[in-house]
Image (tube, rainbow, N blue to C red):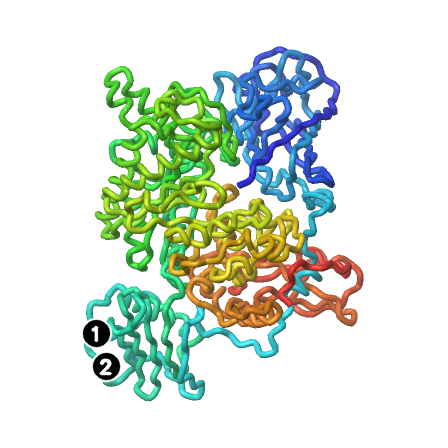
């Protein structure tokens, strides 16, 4: 994630008031919290992209004044506020005294991470009932989305209970109505899509659209005869021996019998393991109407399950299926989905539903990001502080009670900012995954991104310090004599564990041991431990006494890299001693100049690296191939196509961050070329077209070739959870993009091997049309049936001969229109010039997309499907 630093200029408009030094009481605080109406506007982003201007309006609708000197308002910002005055001259730390805004008598402080406070100083003028006050800030870079402004601002006073400011729960960010608000700079090519722009994007180019029978697309289908049908109804028997788990996926949906012998008067579905199938997860599926049978053979139980899933897909459109033979196997051994449960907690039930969908679409790895600065999410034996402190965010005056609020979690521990998996919960997740042949890969991010662990172990240190100093120091993660100043990418000043003390490695060994024990108890052996390794601040350890004892020399960055190398080697040794492979983000293994640390340093059988940084103009996409060529197993995790925390459209109404591409829709994920990384080069972050030569340079000298393709382990989608505040947010951001991910992870399409760009794009668009048709007419219904509230894309609309015609991203979904946003109809309508509002309905008709307004003003869409 990029660093966003802000320069702030403040303009204040004051209503009549007077200086009041009274002390705020709890009653006053409660009244203000319920009556203070806060609205936030992004006023403009400057043409050069250097700054943006936003405005905060305070309207006091309470019956009491906001007065006194002992209160504070806390708010979260992704951006350092008033950096010119709040940050030190070298930018390495925030001044503890904060900064008093001139002529306002409000002091701003950077608390930690993204948490800021504002508090009155002597001379503060009361905000009386019915009073209004506006504060405007200039800030570096840009803000173009409503989710850039986090909710749940709160107010506190000395010795009183913190109170959420009710108006900031939701809907307090005002509309974006002009290009100065939604363009990051003048060069930004993106505008929100109009219905006419969407209509062009959604246009079908394939002259012969055909629904896919199964998604992801099988490798080979033959002997297909639609005139010969097998009716799988009436008496149906599943015949198998020792495949109860795999058979249960059929009996959970259909009332089929189970037996180890075939029935003589009905349809038989045979399940069996056949070692002659070449691929470990491969299967064959034969539908034989004349024999009234379906035969599914798998190389392993997992292969049988994938064959069962293909049969379930065939049956989802009706109980009569045509004669066919499928021979199928996955393109990649690693087909993953990453879920960040640390920034915001995601309950076990949501993970289970996610795994249901992963199984439907043959994904087999669940990468769980269990710890970060903002939260620790798993119970560990003998270390209760990790959940007592590290799993909770709240406002507390006393140290060691909880973590400070972040990401709009507010002052209470009842929001998505708090939560953890008990040992039993985690075992339940593992058991659920095992049944679905999904491998769970736990990640504890270190040495950066570790504030939750650090604060928890400091609470433990204080608990034992007076009774047993050895016990107190056993799992301590910091050097108390470290005088280093730093701010992480997310503006934390204390989030790096110290790699120069033995207690750090005692802690990691403890965590690995306990995770391994939980996996073993659940019958789901731990194979890979992910240590994170990303985004360590350059100066995190430069003034650590313990690190100085190692006699390292050089500048801060070279010292950091040497200590990162030491850290990764020590962690790798711990995992090796536990019989595990190790994984990390690519920057955790980065030695500099796009190259990794020597693979020979690690004894582990496999070392996995998630290659994520392919923001083309940053020049680090080369890492993926350099790492594979150096012996690492690379998981293609590229932010431009596979980060589902990004918006679906370049629209302020769409949830998500946008630091890599401005948006990623299902079409973009579908078009990712995992075997040919540099052919994915398309545009800058501003949408300016890029050629391969722009990025790769003369003779492709900046884009090394892939010499060891066998080291590309697979593909993974990602949901980072900074803006994920609810269960519905999870489903909205992951689906239906997960289906496009699964298609590319399982199936290599013929068009991927086409060298000529124009033909490849044409063939890809034709394939997309088939895929989109299948989603709209079958797969989204299947998601509805298991309770997954996928994103419903807004419709396209076009003026044609005086009539408005509609289309959708996924043909088969219906579109409704209204002249008043109240009464809705479903048909082509004449256009009279009056406002027309449009929305798309879900496949089951129970939900709708966000409402958009039709205008006949033509607006071009970037990278249209056609």
Residue 203 falls left or right of residue 350: right
Height in image: 517 above or below 500? below
Q: Is residue 768 left or right of residue 571?
A: right
Is residue 286 or residue 833 the one in the foreground?
286
Mark 1–mark 2 Cα distance, whole angstroms, equals: 8 Å
Q: Is residue 627 above or below residue 751?
A: above
Which residue corresponds to the image point at 61% horizontal and 41% vertical from the top-left? 171
Q: Is residue 779 visible?
A: yes
Mark 1 lies on residue: 259
Q: Position of residue 734 (x, y in %)?
A: 48, 54
Mark 2, residue position: 263
Could you say where residue 385 lies in the image, as x and y percent from the top left?
A: 32, 29
Within 10 Å of disc 2 (Cα), the crowding (few <14, some 14-19, many 20+) is some
- Residue at 38%, 20% (x, y): give it: 545
Q: Is residue 250 visible?
A: no
In the rendered view of the protein, which quadrant contains the C terminus? bottom right
Q: Are marks 1 and 2 in contact (CB under 8 Å)?
A: yes
Tag 2 secondary structure: loop
Residue shown at the point (31%, 22%) measured from the top left: 461
């Amino acid at each position: 994630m990029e660093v966003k630093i802000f320069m702030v200029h403040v303009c204040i408009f004051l209503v009549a008031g007077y200086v009041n030094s009274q002390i705020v009481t709890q009653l006053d605080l409660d009244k203000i919290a319920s009556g203070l109406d806060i609205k936030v506007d992004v006023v403009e982003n400057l043409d050069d992209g250097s700054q943006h201007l936003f405005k905060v309006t305070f309207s006091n609708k309470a019956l009491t004044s906001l007065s006194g000197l002992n209160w504070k308002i806390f708010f979260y910002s992704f951006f350092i506020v008033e950096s010119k005055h709040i940050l030190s001259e070298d930018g390495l730390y925030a001044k503890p005294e904060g900064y008093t805004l001139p002529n306002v008598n409000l002091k701003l402080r950077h608390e930690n991470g993204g948490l800021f406070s504002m508090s009155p100083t002597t001379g503060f003028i009361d905000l009386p009932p019915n009073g209004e006050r506006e504060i405007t800030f200039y800030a570096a870079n840009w803000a173009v989305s409503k989710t850039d402004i986090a909710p749940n601002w709160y107010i506190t006073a000395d010795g009183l209970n913190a109170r959420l400011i009710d108006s900031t729960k939701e809907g307090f960010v005002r509309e974006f109505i002009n290009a100065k608000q939604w363009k990051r700079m003048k060069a930004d090519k993106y505008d929100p899509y109009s219905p006419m722009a969407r209509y062009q994007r959604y246009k079908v180019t394939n002259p012969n659209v055909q629904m896919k029978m199964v998604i992801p697309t099988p490798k080979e289908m033959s002997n297909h005869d639609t005139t010969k049908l097998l009716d799988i109804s009436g008496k149906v028997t599943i015949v198998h021996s020792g495949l109860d788990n795999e058979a249960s996926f059929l009996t959970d949906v259909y009332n089929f019998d189970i037996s180890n012998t075939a029935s003589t008067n009905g349809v038989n579905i045979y399940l069996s393991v056949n070692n002659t199938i070449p691929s470990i997860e491969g299967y064959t599926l034969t539908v034989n109407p004349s024999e009234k049978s379906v035969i599914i053979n798998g190389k392993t139980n997992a292969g049988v399950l994938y064959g069962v899933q293909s049969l379930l897909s065939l049956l989802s459109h009706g109980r009569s299926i045509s004669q066919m033979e499928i021979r199928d196997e996955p393109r990649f051994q690693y087909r993953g989905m990453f879920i960040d449960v640390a920034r915001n907690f995601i309950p076990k039930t949501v993970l289970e539903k996610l795994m249901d969908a992963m199984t439907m679409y043959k994904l087999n790895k669940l990468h769980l990001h269990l710890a970060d600065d903002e939260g620790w999410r798993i119970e560990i034996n003998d270390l209760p502080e990790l959940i007592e402190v590290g799993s909770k965010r709240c406002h507390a005056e006393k140290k060691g009670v909880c973590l400070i609020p972040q990401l709009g979690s507010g002052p209470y521990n009842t929001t998505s900012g708090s939560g953890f998996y008990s040992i039993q919960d985690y075992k339940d997740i593992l058991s659920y995954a095992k049944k679905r042949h999904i491998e769970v890969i736990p990640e504890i991010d270190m040495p950066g991104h570790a504030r939750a662990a650090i604060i928890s172990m400091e609470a433990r240190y204080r608990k034992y310090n007076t009774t047993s100093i050895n016990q107190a120091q056993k799992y301590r993660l910091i050097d108390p004599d470290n005088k280093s100043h730093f701010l992480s990418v997310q503006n934390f000043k204390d989030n790096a564990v110290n790699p120069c003390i033995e207690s750090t490695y005692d802690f990691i060994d403890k965590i690995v041991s306990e995770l391994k024990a939980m996996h073993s108890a659940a019958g789901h052996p731990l194979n890979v431990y992910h240590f994170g390794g990303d985004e360590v601040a350059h100066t995190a350890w430069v003034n650590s006494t313990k690190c100085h004892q190692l006699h390292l020399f050089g500048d801060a960055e070279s010292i950091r890299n040497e200590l990162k190398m030491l850290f990764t080697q020590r962690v790798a040794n711990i995992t090796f001693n536990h019989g595990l492979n190790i994984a990390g983000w690519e920057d955790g293994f980065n030695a500099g100049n796009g190259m990794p640390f020597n693979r020979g340093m690690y004894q582990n059988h496999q070392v996995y690296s998630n290659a994520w940084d392919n923001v083309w103009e940053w020049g680090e996409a080369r890492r993926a191939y350099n790492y594979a060529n150096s012996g690492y197993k690379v998981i293609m995790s590229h932010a431009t196509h596979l980060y589902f925390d990004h918006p679906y459209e370049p629209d302020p109404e769409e949830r998500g961050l946008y630091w890599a591409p401005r948006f990623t829709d299902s079409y973009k994920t579908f078009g990712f070329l995992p075997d040919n990384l540099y052919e994915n080069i398309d545009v800058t972050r501003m949408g300016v077209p890029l050629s391969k030569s722009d990025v790769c340079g003369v003779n492709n000298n900046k884009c090394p070739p892939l010499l060891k393709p066998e080291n590309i382990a697979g593909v993974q989608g990602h949901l980072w959870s900074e803006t994920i505040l609810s269960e519905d947010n999870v489903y909205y951001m992951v689906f239906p993009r997960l289906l496009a991910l699964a298609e590319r992870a399982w199936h290599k399409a013929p068009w991927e091997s086409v060298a000529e760009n124009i033909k490849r794009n044409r063939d890809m668009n034709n394939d997309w049309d088939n895929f989109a048709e299948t989603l709209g007419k079958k797969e989204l219904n299947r998601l509805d049936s298991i309770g997954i509230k996928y994103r419903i894309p807004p419709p396209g609309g076009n003026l044609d001969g005086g009539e408005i015609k509609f289309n959708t991203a996924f043909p088969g979904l219906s579109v409704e229109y209204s002249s008043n946003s109240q009464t809705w109809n479903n048909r082509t309508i004449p256009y009279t010039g009056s406002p027309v509002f449009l929305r798309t309905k879900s496949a089951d008709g129970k939900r709708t997309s966000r409402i958009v307004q039709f205008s006949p003003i033509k607006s071009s869409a970037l990278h249209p499907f056609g």
